[in-house]
């Protein structure tokens, strides 16, 4: 029983890493209607900014706040001078552009700071606590609670605030939003900026656990995309729950399903993805889209 609980706790911690990136993807999609594959690269770049500042004896909290400001500006600039050229065209083209942007950011980070592993300081203590024979890292608890807080804020943003409703309106139908008097171009910049801020928070939470490298979030991005599809592109709560499910089921399958083991556990989220999409193509918590023809 103790081993089972330990696997579940560790799975929740790992799933929180996936959820951090998945929430940023949901934010971009809810604000612009696009899936941003460069989200992981932008998060890594923000983490490097914070890391450089901490090496200059800047307090960690101040360095993270500075990286958040940097990320907001970066997201807004990327939307204004790059993505705006493709947002009203073929969505597939815009997605390819975000993949190219991911490659570019990864290359720039590797060129500036090398591909060596760097130690990123943790926002939370590294101590562990024991509960019912299970060791739980305080850092894992802090990361999980932070993701829950971000999830709640994001859900409230899109449901309870005028800004969130305006962002959703622009993503669904930018022309109608413009006719209604909404500043579409400014809102798109804000949407990308907020998503980049969320990526900066994710980078600061994840980097201490994975060590900082230009490709730190490449694998996590794959799992995050799976969580987004499972949970639904329109549901922050759904993608977090889906990310936790992936982390927990992956751990349990690796130990309790002999033919999977640790070598094939990467297939678990994709098997789960296949089963869910057959039953609910819109995801576990997503909404069906009705289109008039």
Image (spheres, rainbow, N blue to C red):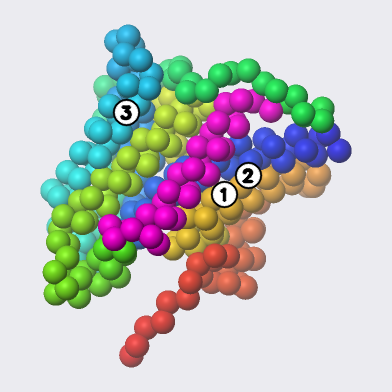
Residue 28 placement: quadrant: bottom left
Q: Earlier in the sequence, mark 3 or mark 1?
A: 3
Q: Are marks 1 and 2 in contact (CB under 8 Å)?
A: yes
Rounded to the nearest whole Å, what is the CA distance between mark 1 and mark 2? 6 Å
Bounds of the magenta span? 136-164
Q: Residues within 10 Å of mark 3 (few under 14, many from 20)?
A: some
Secondary element under disc 1, as helix, strand or loop, is: helix
Residue 16 horizontal/vertical position (percent): 55, 41
Q: Residues within 10 Å of mark 2 (few under 14, many from 20)?
A: many
Tell me: residue 171, above or below residue 198: below
In the image, what residue occupies the spot 86% across and 38% down? 1
Q: Choose between 73 and 104: the one closer to the eye.
A: 73
Front position among marks 3 and 2 = 3
Residue 280 left/right relative to 206: right
Which of the numbered marks, if any, corresponds to residue 243? 1
Which of the numbered marks, if any, corresponds to residue 247? 2
Asked whether 126 falls inside the magenta stretch, the response is: no
Residue assigned mark 3:
65
Secondary structure that dominates the magenta span? helix
């Amino acid at each position: 029983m103790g081993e089972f609980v330990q696997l579940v706790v560790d799975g929740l911690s790992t799933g929180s890493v996936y959820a951090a990136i998945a929430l940023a993807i949901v934010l971009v999609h809810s604000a612009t209607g696009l899936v941003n594959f460069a989200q992981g690269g932008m998060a890594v770049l923000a983490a490097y900014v914070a890391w450089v500042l901490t090496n200059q004896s800047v307090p960690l909290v101040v360095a993270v706040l500075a990286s958040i400001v940097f990320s907001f500006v970066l997201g807004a600039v990327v939307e204004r001078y790059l993505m705006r050229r493709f947002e009203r065209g073929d969505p597939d083209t815009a997605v390819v552009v975000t993949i190219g942007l991911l490659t570019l950011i990864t290359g720039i980070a590797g060129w500036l700071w090398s591909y060596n592993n760097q130690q990123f300081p943790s926002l939370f203590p590294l101590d562990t606590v024991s509960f019912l024979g299970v060791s739980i890292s305080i850092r894992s608890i802090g990361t999980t609670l932070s993701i829950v807080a971000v999830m709640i804020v994001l859900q409230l943003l899109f449901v309870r605030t005028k800004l969130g409703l305006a962002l959703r309106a622009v993503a669904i139908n930018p022309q109608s939003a413009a006719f209604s008097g909404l500043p579409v171009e400014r809102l798109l910049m804000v949407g990308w900026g907020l998503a980049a801020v969320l990526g900066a928070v994710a980078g600061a939470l994840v980097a201490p656990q994975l060590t900082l490298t230009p490709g730190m979030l490449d694998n996590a991005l794959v799992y995050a995309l799976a969580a987004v599809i499972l949970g639904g592109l329109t549901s922050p709560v759904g993608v977090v729950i889906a990310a936790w499910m992936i982390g927990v089921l992956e751990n349990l399958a690796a130990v309790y399903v002999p033919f999977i083991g640790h070598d094939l556990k990467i297939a678990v989220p994709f098997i789960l993805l296949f089963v869910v999409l057959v039953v609910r193509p819109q995801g576990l918590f997503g909404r069906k889209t009705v289109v008039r023809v």
